[in-house]
Amino acid sequence: MAHQDNHPITVMLPEQSLEFSFHEFCERGEVHGEFVVKLVNYGVIAPVRECVKSEWCFDLAALQRLRKAQRLQRDLKMNLPGLALSLELLDDVNRLEREVQQLRQQLRQLLGE
């Protein structure tokens, strides 16, 4: 009998492993470099490392977070401290939702459902 592994298979798309230079990040996010620097200073986004010439590199997650910050700023007219706080709270909500889902799954397993 063949062993079945119930672990999900993770497929990494090429774009998920991409890193963007500061210039590429600004182009893809359609923002000025000054805005990116301010977002980093407020902790809204974080570079993954330094690239060439002491320039920051960003990953796809940072680009997605930048776009979320842009939507909040555009739609709700938030300032940078408000963006930082809102994104932190949204991260907390997402983490708590995942935790609740895991606890529900554990409870179902304990109850034999």
Image (tube, rainbow, N blue to C red):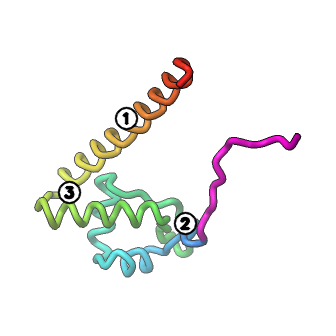
In the image, is residue 6 part of the stretch drawn in magenta?
yes
Residue extending farthest right = 1
Could you give the CA–CA distance between mark 3 and mark 2, rounded to whole angstroms?
Answer: 27 Å
Decide if residue 25 is on the left or right side of residue 57.
left
Decide if residue 4 is on the left or right side of residue 89.
right
Decide if residue 73 is on the left or right side of residue 10.
left
Q: Please tell me in which quadrant of the rendered image residue 5 appears.
A: top right
- Residue 22, percent from left and from top: 43, 74
Residue tagged by mark 1?
A: 96
In the image, is residue 55 part of the stretch drawn in magenta?
no
Q: Please tell me in which quadrant of the rendered image residue 28 appears.
A: bottom left
Q: Is mark 2 on a helix, strand or loop?
A: helix
Task: Give the numbered dot on residue 88.
Answer: none
Could you give the CA–CA distance between mark 3 and mark 1, rounded to whole angstroms?
Answer: 24 Å
Q: Which of 108 and 55 is in front in this view?
A: 108
Residue at the spot 88% in from the left edge and 40% down from the top edge: 1
Q: In this view, does 112 lie above or below 58?
A: above
Q: Do the residues labelled 3 and 1 touch (CB within 8 Å)?
A: no
Q: Of the residues shown, which amino acid type is indicated by label 1?
A: Leu
- Residue 69, percent from left and from top: 27, 61
**Stretch of the chain drawn in magenta:** 1-13
The tag earlier along the polypeptide, 3 or 2, is: 2
Residue at the spot 56% in from the left edge and 70% down from the top edge: 18
Task: Give the numbered dot on residue 80.
Answer: 3
Q: What element carries label 3?
A: helix
- Residue 94, percent from left and from top: 36, 43
Q: Residues within 10 Å of mark 1 (few under 14, many from 20)?
A: few
Q: Of the residues shown, which amino acid type is indicated by label 2?
A: Gln
Residue at the spot 25% in from the left edge and 66% down from the top edge: 70
Residue tagged by mark 2?
A: 16
